Image (spheres, rainbow, N blue to C red):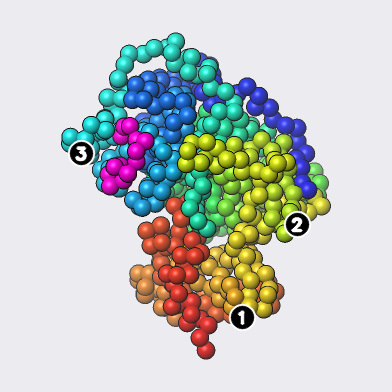
Amino acid sequence: MATAEQPHPSAEGLTITALLRRNAQQYPERPALTTGIGPDAGTLTWSQLRAEVAALTRGLTLLGLERGDRMLIAMSARAEHWIADLAAVHAGALPCSTYDTMGTEQIGVLARHSAATVLLLEGEEQVRRWQPLLNDLPDLRAVVVLDWDAAPAGDPRFVAYTAVRGATAPDDAAFEALTDAVTPDRPLALTYTAGTTGDPKGVVLTHRNVIHECRMQQQLVPLPEHPRSLAYLPPAHVAGRVLGIHMPVCDAGHVTICPAPGGLLPALRTVRPQVFFGVPRVWEKIAAALRAELATLPAEQAEPVAQARRTALEVHRLRSEGTDLPAELTGPLEQLDAQVMRPFRAAVGLDDCHRAFNGAAPVPTAVQEFLASVGLPVYEVWGLAETTGAATISVPGGFAPGSAGRPGPGIEVEEAGDGELLVRGPVVCAGYLRADGTVESATDADGWLPTGDVGTVDSRGLVTVTDRKKEIIVTDGGKNIAPARIESLLRAHPLVAHAVVIGERRRHLTALLVLDEETAPSWARARGITASGPDALSRDPEVLEALDRAVAEANAVLSHEEQVRNHRVLAGPWTTETGELTPGLSLRRRAIDELHAATIEAMYTP
């Protein structure tokens, strides 16, 4: 069993509502929330943000939103989304965001299960998707619409956001009473799981869960006061909600909402975040941007950068082994980083990043080592919605390639008899929302949460996740094979956006490789390949040959049973609309088996 080595970060008595008040009182003129990038961006200070939350809270309570109610938010990432979420919390209700990519059928499952009494919609697109469901939601009392022109005429349930916000005059005493009424164990947020193996589950997080998570990260990897961050993950995702909404409140930080995922790199350069969380594909794209920058360096700059990279990589490898660093390395590294590498990292806006985390799946070792060599070590975390995000965290003194670090302070992780990882501690959620509004515990009698992930805990207390329990492949020869590591090796090639290993009850493994719609065209152009468009590239001989080599290189480090014997290249892209991905961009393996059944069968046909 692995347990934390750090003292427990106390969250006793703290709530998000009280911390928001602290920020408005102690840092009233400091920036809190910026929407957009560039000269048209709008910023709310902490005092302004709390005033907006207070106004909307009053209006929502007049609409009938009560303590214990659920409120659904269907908006893009914008200031009103943050304000609505915090207003619901002050009213004692439980806010829940839905993914923009969800279709009517998918959001219907969440709407009926949550029994939401109030729904907030942004505009025409959201009204179009939600309107067919409204008569099937008996608990719904009001639909608040931000863009009032999109609301249907004559439906009394619809009300304009501006009308709700301005429904009544300020009442400071009443709002302060609502702030004081919130307790640490009250529900703070509702987040639905991806539902890759069935209907999504509604995970209920408390103030205590979230504040412990935020304080734990600050204790392990401290940030400067009032840290800058960039919110680009959807608030429907646990990481998007905790990192984008709650952590800035806890740290009195300044969060900038990225207008669209496609604008991430320009937003990074503008914001220069001091904390940044990414998934492997994001880090791969950042690494590609830095490699492109390396290629443009003149000779007189290239050699100092190469020297700095060699030193940084040596330090990274020594730290991964748990080795003490000699003084002859640490001193020069600090000087080289300040003079050479930090200006270089400015090309992607991560020159002042103090905390760089990765989650969802491990970053390929080659990518991780490249980033470490330019002074941007990316540390793995592991967790799930039920653990408020990170349950284990890698830090400079406690990490290893492929591992997800040690349990955070106050958290325990142990292996069950079948290899499943169990978690216990203050980040474990209150439970799952039942359809009747009550909460069902997610843990056993001893407080252990079964995570569904299979993994190991080594002698250093480092946790390594090998796969999802329900995704283990059992071949027809009875071999149990974890596909995650194989897929990670295949995704390391810049042409590949998604890799899916097939083999359940089959004689050997095969794989589907999906081209990356962003990097594949540039990779082809750099090699003089004239084919254009995903379909043409997926049939191009040079592309196919490159991916044949990628599969062979992966097979070279895999055991005989893990080797991929056949593969197919698909044009893609895969999206939630095409059916292969969940709204959180996880693979829907069952759907992939069905959607690509003919291609899969062809790989097993002599």
Q: Which residue is mark 3?
A: 152
- Residue 78 showing in the rendered view: no
Residue 166 against residue 438 in the figure, above or below:
above
Report whether 565 appears left or right of 437.
right
**Residue 41 image-quadrant placement:** top left
The residue located at (69%, 52%) in the rendering is 421
In the rendered image, residue 217, in percent from the top left (x then y), is placed at: 64, 37
**Distance between the alpha carbons at the discs numbered 2 and 3:** 56 Å
In the rendered image, residue 464, in percent from the top left (x then y), is placed at: 70, 55
Q: Give the residues in magenta.
A: 131-143
The residue located at (53%, 82%) in the rendering is 604
Category of crowding for the residue at label 1, using alpha-carbon neighbours closer than 10 angstroms: few (below 14), some (14–19), many (at least 20): some
The circle on residue 417 is 2
Q: Are marks 1 and 3 in contact (CB under 8 Å)?
A: no
Q: What type is the residue that disc 3 sits on?
A: Pro
- Pick the front one: 333 or 30: 30
Q: What type is the residue that disc 1 sits on?
A: Arg
- Pick the front one: 364 or 99: 99
Q: What type is the residue that disc 2 sits on?
A: Gly
Q: Which residue is mark 1?
A: 507
| Residue furthest bottom in the image | 606
Category of crowding for the residue at label 3, using alpha-carbon neighbours closer than 10 angstroms: few (below 14), some (14–19), many (at least 20): some
Q: Earlier in the sequence, mark 2 or mark 3?
A: 3
In the rendered image, residue 487, in percent from the top left (x then y), is placed at: 58, 66
